[in-house]
Image (cartoon, rainbow, N blue to C red):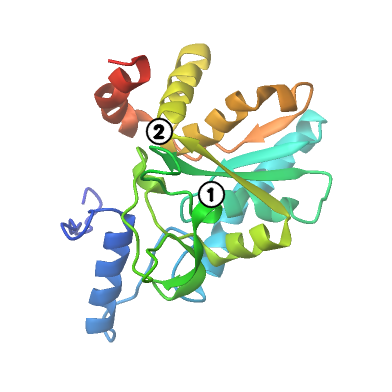
Amino acid sequence: ELFGARVVPVYAGQKTLKDAASEALRDWIANVNTTYYCLGSAIGPHPYPKIVREFQRVIGKEAKRQLLKAGISADCIIACVGGGSNSIGIFYDFLGNAKVKLIGVEAGGEGLNKRHCATLSKGRIGVLHGTKSYLLQTPDGQVSDVHSISAGLDYPGVGPEHSYLKESGRVKYAHAGDLEALEAFEFLSRKEGIIPAMESAHALAYLLKEKEKFRGKTVVICLSGRGDKDLGIYQENRGKRYGY
């Protein structure tokens, strides 16, 4: 709104990314002659996932240049995955290099037997927002209620290109829970003075959990955003981190 846009809050459903995307699509369909639909995640009908990937590729291109400038090669790249925009952005330019391991980390929420957003770990093929991809759904095919401490990962589907990369085996998909993300958020903030977005903290949490596997390796983590916006969430949930 600072730059003149009109922001419309969505109060339907769980009030998450899924519900915002649904309402935007409804408005677009109702006003198709005067409206252009635009979204920031690699989801939705073609060509939106491709459009988002092409714009987000700047992440991978910059990472490649920085590695070249430093004179090092990446052994592994880790990024968080919700809809999958930042991760496909950093992965794409490395897909052709089989020496670079690619790992996407989903939101494990409260645990995979409870509420979570680990679509590629626990979902099955379905259709949402015009995309055929992995989807968290009930046995009857209804979209499941999902949960993540991170708003950006709180989505029951995933971009179709990630589904392909999972099935081809080129990218490994894992998960990190709410408490693990909180711990990683605090770890990087205290150790480096860098406050990561809670989304990015999931990628860092996976690395911390599996650190022995990566000892001596060059690992690139995509810090997809700043965590200033998440300080309130951290403050509200830090008691869970310490067990009170």
What kind of element bears circle 2?
helix
Residue occupied by mark 2: 178
Mark closest to the chain's N terminus, 2 or 1: 1
Q: Nearer the viewer, residue 200 or 13?
A: 13
Q: Residue 76's x, y, as percent?
A: 73, 38
Q: Is residue 84 among what the camera can see?
A: no
Report crowding for label 2: few under 14, some 14 to 19, many 20 or more residues within 10 A (C-alpha).
many
The amino acid sitting under disc 2 is Asp
Q: Residue at x 29, y 25 (%)?
A: 237
Report crowding for label 1: few under 14, some 14 to 19, many 20 or more residues within 10 A (C-alpha).
many
Q: Is residue 160 left or right of residue 142?
A: right
Relative height, residue 131 to residue 71 (above, below): below
Q: Residue at x 59, y 63 (%)?
A: 163
Q: Residue at x 53, y 49 (%)?
A: 86
What kind of element bears circle 1?
helix
Q: Residue 124's x, y, as percent?
A: 51, 64
Relative height, residue 99 to residue 161 (above, below): above
Relative height, residue 139 to residue 225 (above, below): below
Q: Is residue 67 left or right of residue 241?
A: right
Q: Residue at x 21, y 59 (%)?
A: 13
Q: Is residue 242 left or right of residue 212?
A: left
Q: Between marks 2 and 1, how big is the CA–CA gap? A: 20 Å
Extreme bottom residue here?
33
Q: Residue 219's x, y, as percent?
A: 70, 31
Q: Residue 233's x, y, as percent?
A: 29, 30
Residue occupied by mark 1: 86
Q: Is residue 179 among what the camera can see?
A: yes
Rendered image quadrant of residue 6:
bottom left
Rendered image quadrant of residue 69:
top right
The amino acid sitting under disc 1 is Asn
